[in-house]
Amino acid sequence: MDPPKGRSLTQDAIRRLRRNKAAVVSIVVVLLIVIVAIVGPYLLPWSYDKIDWSAIRKPPNFEKGHFAGTDQNGRDMLARIMQGTQMSLIVAATATSVSVVIGVIYGAVAGYFGGRVDAVMMRFVDIMYALPYILFVIILVVIFGRSPVLLFVGIGCLEWLTMARIVRGQTLSIKEREFIEAAKAGGAKPWTIIMRHIVPNLTGPVVIYATLTIPEIIITESFLSYLGLGVQEPQTSLGRLISFGSAAAEILPWMLIGPAVVLVTLLLCLTYIGDGLRDALDPKDR
């Protein structure tokens, strides 16, 4: 009989993640929210930008298909919440991807070369940290316009600083290992070593921090939309909906409750997922 096979690091991480009930439940909830946000608009009788002139500022009405009521312009709130969830998730995913790419490359280069290169690059990061982050985003939006694409890229380009520091610290440790020395002895160029040997070994910390970055970006986008500097009509986002809802909360409470519940649920679930991934991928706990 063949001896039992040992688990790989990936299998061990998945097993540990499954044991974290909060993270598993959060993953299921986030997946349900994503599926409903994508598929839901096709199942509703009203689109997010269609006006029902006979149901302006009306509470939930199942007979007319307004399951979460309508806003001050007669638009279906459930359809707008789904559209807003789509937009907030797109902003978060795109901006996180941009920040991961910049942060990983920047931090890996700084950590690998070390010396003066590392000192100059990390001092630049320190200077960027000292400047007000949200002010940069507002300036970008004001100068270049309120394009959703610009919002995605702008937030991502300013969200990479912590990622760069994490990657730089990991790279300083990885570059001293034997397989890196073997690659150098084999004549591999620095860029090849960084991309083929160092970056793949950064997957754990990068995935963990990227998961924890998504809620932060959603909050940033919501704050900008709340100020009127984010997503513009007829598009919407959860932050934009909360902005309108808070202004009319006393007479139209359903305009605030719906998007606020979705936003809080998303943020809590993504935080639990990040904590679960951290515990599952942390080599100190293996």
Image (tube, rainbow, N blue to C red):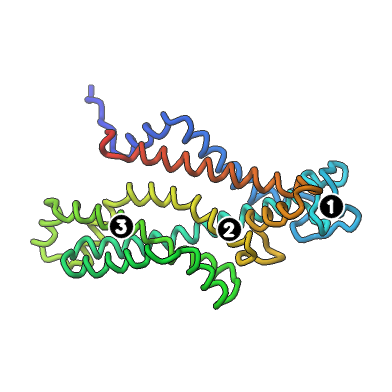
The label number, if any, that marks residue 157 in the structure image: none
**Secondary structure category for the residue under label 1:** loop
Q: Quadrant of residue 266?
A: top right
The residue at the far right in this view is 54
Q: Label 3, label 2: how many angstroms apart (C-alpha)?
A: 25 Å
Which residue is at a point 64% across and 43% down the rendered structure image?
A: 261
N-terminal of the pair, mark 3 or mark 1, is: 1
Q: Label 2, label 1: how many angstroms apart (C-alpha)?
A: 25 Å
Q: Residue under circle 1?
A: 57
> Dot 3, how many residues are within 10 Å of its Cα: few (below 14), some (14-19), or many (20+)?
many
The kind of residue tagged 1 is Arg
Q: Residue under circle 2?
A: 223
Q: Is residue 154 above or below residue 31?
A: below
Could you tell me if the residues under marks 3 and 2 are in contact, i.e. CB atoms within 8 Å? Answer: no
Q: Residue under circle 3?
A: 165
Q: Quadrant of residue 253?
A: top right
Q: Quadrant of residue 19?
A: top left
Could you tell me if the residues under marks 3 and 1 are in contact, i.e. CB atoms within 8 Å? Answer: no
